[in-house]
Amino acid sequence: MASTAPSPTRMRYLPVVAQLAFAAAALSVPFFLSGGSYLLYVATQLGVYVVAAIGLNLLAGYVGQVSLGHAAFLAIGAYATALLTVDHQWSFWAAAVVGIVLSAGLGVLMALPSFRLTTWYFAFITLAFALVFEKMIVEWRGLTKGFAGVIGVPPPQFFGFELGQKALYWLVAGTAIVCFLIVRNMVKSRFGRGFVAVRDTPAAALAAGASPQRLKMLGFIVAAAFAGIAGAFFAVQKTVVTPDDFTADFSIFFLLTVVLGGLGTLWGPVFGALVFFLIPELLHGLESWRMLVYGCILLVLMLFAPQGLVGALNAGVRRLTARPRGAPGAAAATSAAAPVAHPPIAGAALAVEGLKKRFGGVAALDDVAVRAGPGTCCAIVGPNGSGKTTLLNVVGGFYERDEGTVQIDGRETRGMSAQAVAGLGLGRTFQTPRLLNDLSIVDNVLLGAFTRERAWLPEIVLRLPRARREAAALRAEALGYLDFVGIADRAEDLASEVPHGQQRLVEIARALMGGARLLMLDEPAAGLSMVELDKLEQLISRIRDLGATVVIVEHHLDLVASIASHVIVLDRGRVLAAGAPSEVFADPAVQRAYMGERAVQGAPAS
Ligand SMILES: Nc1ncnc2c1ncn2[C@@H]1O[C@H](COP(=O)(O)OP(=O)(O)OP(=O)(O)O)[C@@H](O)[C@H]1O
């Protein structure tokens, strides 16, 4: 019987066909409208807004930095273009470049507070900035001409020819398409995975060796530069630039556009701008009813599609094309990749001495020593609150230590950031899996390769051969790692869709993808079924036997007894006992402190 489900190949090409069709439709608009028409003017303005919204969506949707001051970036692009062309007779192109550079520079400044502030505090700062900036434009009369604004911005010239309204439209629409493609190529690359990690789980970004600060900075620069471009077009399209054009309302309009269009979706800003800019324009004839109808549309959307237009559409498509569990599909596609015969791993030795860490009055670690060598598994056990996770966090560079030494492969890690420690070959998993829920399983694994990718941003944006080759090779490798941990059939599923036990395996695959030579697992058996536990035990044993150094924090003592050659028991931050599992678990002090008197009889023998 012929299947009615859309074929995976057809589904894969659908977005490309849709993108081409949309671009063709956008570029053909001037063929249906006359040169001086109001609609062409509106369509050009829409294109300008799309450019700005695409940038804001990258920043707010992907990097998670909600900015309520986007209008300021546009204002810089617009005023620079207007002032340089009107007062100094610069060409549009040179003036626009200055506007874009200045706007990107402001983006750098705006990025700085985001390094320290949480999302909402940062949003308030940007709102305050937008309000101050609005006043500044008015008050700095000597430069901006105050309320009067800059009048008579000339149209761009191209080889001596003045661009008419149709040509300007094509220029704006072409720029919007280019901006869309830049963002599309970026978010599909390691930068996109890094952005989402910074947004959803910065610890996972750090563990993968990615710098949240640099990624935020990149997001701000791109968003601000796009707004600068939009501002330059805004100036020539309107021919007048005044402070009223760049109020805080304008910033809020952009945020509304990307949120209601679908925050963090590629098409969100495009459809958002289309709907939320065009609707009030098209409702012009309704006069006073216009805003009421507009408000009702927004309300309905917020109620029925809180994830935005495109977010709701994507969710619908996912539901329609969902593959029944166990049916061939992505499973068949991924299992076709040859199972990886993993080469040996050159394990990195861990040596910790005299480690101390206090949180106020609590001594979370007090003179702790750990030694683990390649091809061995060292288990850290102890009651809740005994300092196990703190130990992993200090070794991983997530917390600064108070005293002591930590050496990975003989290198002292004092003063190193978490991403620098990851660069020494440390891979880790977390007590609660830190996955990028909106990305596929294979993308989650690919995050692990963040620092291994060599293609530069321009190569990625332009999809040059090296970037494409590298992306294909890494993807094949990631699928291999999913095969290795036994979940290749879930490669294309969203991380949020896979069960808890498999999420833990994804984290292990991600660490291996990052080239982990010292693997630290924080309670990997928590919440697993007996079958999953068996598989986990085999997997960790395989990784250890390949030569990696494994350090495992675990409450499941049977698992510890079967895979660890050395056990360290922590109790209130101090090492209570250390040695082979059989000795340690037989120690009455350990039995009393950790397992309690009643459990002593049930302790594993070895
Ligand atoms: N960021 C922090 N700020 C303040 N106190 C902390 C912090 N992290 C850990 N602690 C404290 O340090 C001590 C050790 O905590 P830690 O999470 O390392 O224990 P654990 O052995 O991993 O416990 P569990 O088995 O419950 O995960 C606890 O008293 C905890 O409250």
Image (cartoon, rainbow, N blue to C red):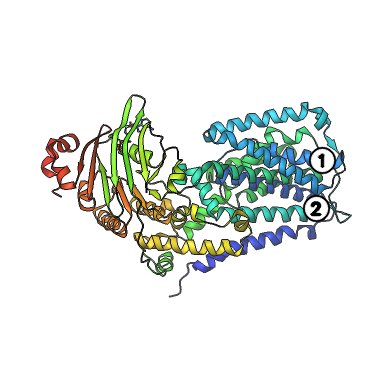
Q: Which residue is mark 1?
A: 82
Seen from the viewer's position, the closer of residues 566 and 509 is: 566
Return the residue at label 2. 168
- Please name whichever residue, 62 or 585, is drawn nearer the observer in this view of the structure: 585
User: Is residue 528 placed above or below 104 in the rendered structure?
Assistant: below
Name the one closer to the observer, 336 or 461: 461
Q: Residues within 10 Å of mark 1 (few under 14, many from 20)?
A: many
Q: Residue 94, percent across and down?
A: 80, 47
Taking the view exactly as shown, the residue that stands out farthest to the bottom is 1
Query: Residue 233: in sight, yes or no?
Result: no
Question: In the rendered image, is residue 37 in sight?
Answer: yes
For the residue labelled by badge 1, is the local secondary structure a helix, a strand or a loop? helix
Percent across and percent down for residue 192 are 54, 51
- Residue farthest to the right, as pictured: 160
Mark 2 or mark 1: name the one nearer the start of the chain: 1
Q: Position of residue 311 (x, y in %)?
A: 54, 50
Residues at discs 2 and 1 in contact (Cβ within 8 Å): no
Q: Position of 588 compared to 217: left or right?
A: left
Left or right placement of residue 86 versus residue 542 in this view:
right
Amino acid type of disc 1? Ala
Quarter of the image with the N terminus is: bottom left
Q: Residue at x 27, y 34 (%)?
A: 386
Label 2 element class: helix
The single residue placed furthest to the front in the displayed view is 410
